[in-house]
Image (cartoon, rainbow, N blue to C red):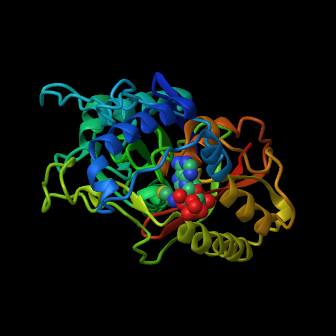
Amino acid sequence: MSRPVISATGLYTPPHSISNAELVTSLNSWTDNWNAEHADEIAAGKLEAKQHSSVEFIEKASGIKSRFVVEKSGVIDPKVMRPYIPERPNEQISVLAEIAVSAAREAMAKAGREGREIDAVICAASNMQRAYPAMAVEVQAAIGAEGFAFDMNVACSSATFGIQTAADFVRAGHAKTVLMVNPEICSGHLNFTDRDSHFIFGDVATAVLIEAEDVAPRGSWSILGTHLKTQFSNNIRNNFGFLNRADPSGVGARDKLFVQEGRKVFKEVVPMVSAMIQSEMDRLGIRPSDLKRMWLHQANAGMNRLIAERVLGHEASENESPTVLDTYANTSSAGSIIAFHKHSGDFRPGEKGVICSFGAGYSAGTVFVEKAA
Ligand code: COA
């Protein structure tokens, strides 16, 4: 049986960044217009006036300061409040595949891999651009890979579920080299007119190469163990689908974009994820002092503080639990992979860390890794 390792990662960061101040200015302007348009109903008590957002609230409640997006002008235009991403003809690569390929190329270059050496492609993300053909098959064609490819969606936990799936293919001998990509255009599923959530997400793509140890380059990451968990919850939902093709700006459209009960998520997910990491550490015989770093899902700075503290037994330093949320915001499945990609270069052989995701479903996944010689 081949032992799976992570041999390289890649990152695509979109060219545009939106600060909290820019986002709040557009939401507040949209809100003033909405309140003016509905002044009579508000005065008659039929509608509630909408409230302004604030930079202070966003930073304090979430730790987010800015986010990257593939298209900025529509998002910050109070008359539009959504990214302007024109549909492309079928002959042109789709936006999701394009950013996935960009991240993939970095990972492939680092591992010295050509497309034809890749046996399988998994596109694991929260929001696929279309039903079919699979994004993964488009990525496979773009990089010139053979073998097979498919999409999978486990919301914010898609990447860890993708890593375990790829590792299982390697163990079973179905593939030697698997490319797992996480293109996340979260600005497309976000309601930028909703004060409770307009600040939460950003766009990005990440890529992870999972390979059999015997073909991987030196200095890869041994996968010590993976563990996945799901538990049904309505607290994070997006009801958009092919059975409800209503105009997304129309009545009843609110739940066809991201909606959540943020407080409940915070309360329920922190204990679930801390306990999951701890029980996996017990299973693998890893003590808190053996862990150099936790690359946690990037949804909320407060959640990460609490989870890391429960696991490590002390308040985690930035070095022990790095943050990318401040500049990237929540990038769904890609968050923990961005943290791993940007904050793993200092590891020496034998040092251990954990990649951990959590989100809608609920879903959570852990991938314990050790830097190899
Ligand atoms: N600007 C100013 N005030 C705002 C605001 C905004 N943009 N949005 C909400 N508020 C107000 C609320 O109206 C509320 O006011 P009230 O106390 O008078 O009722 C107050 O701020 C607190 O709102 P609440 O929604 O309870 O905030 P919170 O402290 O729970 O923070 C989240 C909100 C979403 C940042 C936080 O709950 C969170 O991150 N939860 C986890 C989310 C998560 O991980 N989701 C996974 C997605 S994959």
Q: Is residue 217 visible?
A: yes
Figure check: 275 above or below 8: below
Of 2 and 319, nearer the camera is 319
Measured from the top left, where is residue 369 in percent x and y? 67, 55
**How many discs appear?**
0
Figure check: 45 above or below 7: below
Q: Is residue 337 left or right of residue 115?
A: right
Of 123 and 192, nearer the camera is 192
Measured from the top left, where is residue 332 in percent x and y? 47, 50
Measured from the top left, where is residue 170 in percent x and y? 46, 56
Q: Tell me the quarter of the image containing the C terminus.
A: top right
Q: Residue at x 54, y 68 (%)?
A: 265
Of 350 and 56, nearer the camera is 56
Q: Is residue 243 left or right of residue 149?
A: left
Figure check: 257 above or below 18: below
Q: Residue at x 30, y 52 (%)?
A: 151
Figure check: 70 above or below 369: above
Q: Is residue 166 visible?
A: no
Q: Residue at x 41, y 28 (%)?
A: 102
Q: Quadrant of ligand 1?
A: bottom right
Q: Residue at x 29, y 31 (%)?
A: 79
Of 154 and 211, nearer the camera is 154
Measured from the top left, where is residue 283 in percent x and y? 69, 76
